[in-house]
Image: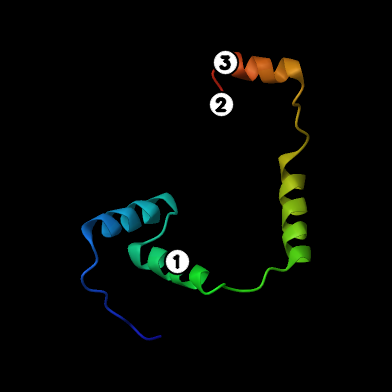
């Protein structure tokens, strides 16, 4: 895999990249690569695969009780 070096990156851009890398749990290099890949469109979206992943994730959550009483209780106990 080829390497490249970036020079002359403005301080503000460098700070933002580092902050974004921390938020995304990536290295600075990983953040830059992810942004470059995203800028070129990346892999085409497979809607069926995405729906399958969403359904699998939903199954692990179990039933959600979002009744008015539950939401009020969550709000009153400080849960966002």
Mark 3 near mark 1, Cβ–Cβ under 8 Å? no
**Quadrant of the image occupied by residue 79:** top right
**Quadrant of the image occupied by residue 35:** bottom left
- Image position of 44 with respect to 4: above or below: above
The structure residue drawn at horizontal position 72% and vertical position 57%, both measured from the top left corner, is 53
How far is mark 2 from mark 3, CA to CA?
A: 9 Å
Q: Which residue is mark 3?
A: 77
Q: Which label sits on residue 35? A: 1
Q: Horizontal and vertical percent for residue 38?
A: 51, 68
The structure residue drawn at horizontal position 76% and vertical position 27%, both measured from the top left corner, is 65
Quadrant where the C terminus sits is: top right
How far is mark 3 from mark 1, CA to CA?
A: 39 Å
Nearest to N terminus: mark 3 or mark 1 = 1
Q: Horizontal and vertical percent for residue 43?
A: 61, 74
Q: Which residue is mark 2?
A: 80
Find numbered disc 3 in the image and state the secondary structure of the residue it sits on: loop
The structure residue drawn at horizontal position 41% and vertical position 59%, both measured from the top left corner, is 26
Q: Nearer the viewer, residue 44 or 51?
A: 44
- Image position of 19 with respect to 36: above or below: above
Give the mark toward the camera: 3 or 1: 1
Q: Horizontal and vertical percent for residue 22?
A: 37, 52
Mark 2 closeness class: few <14, some 14–19, many ≥20 residues within 10 Å: few
């Amino acid at each position: 895999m080829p390497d490249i070096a970036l020079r002359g990156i403005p301080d503000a851009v460098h700070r933002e990249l580092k902050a974004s890398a921390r938020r995304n749990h990536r290295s600075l290099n990983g953040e830059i690569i992810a942004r470059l890949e995203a800028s070129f469109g990346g892999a085409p979206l497979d809607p069926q695969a995405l729906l399958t992943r969403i359904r699998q994730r939903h199954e692990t959550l179990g039933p959600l009780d979002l009744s008015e009483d539950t939401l009020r209780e969550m709000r009153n106990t400080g849960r966002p």
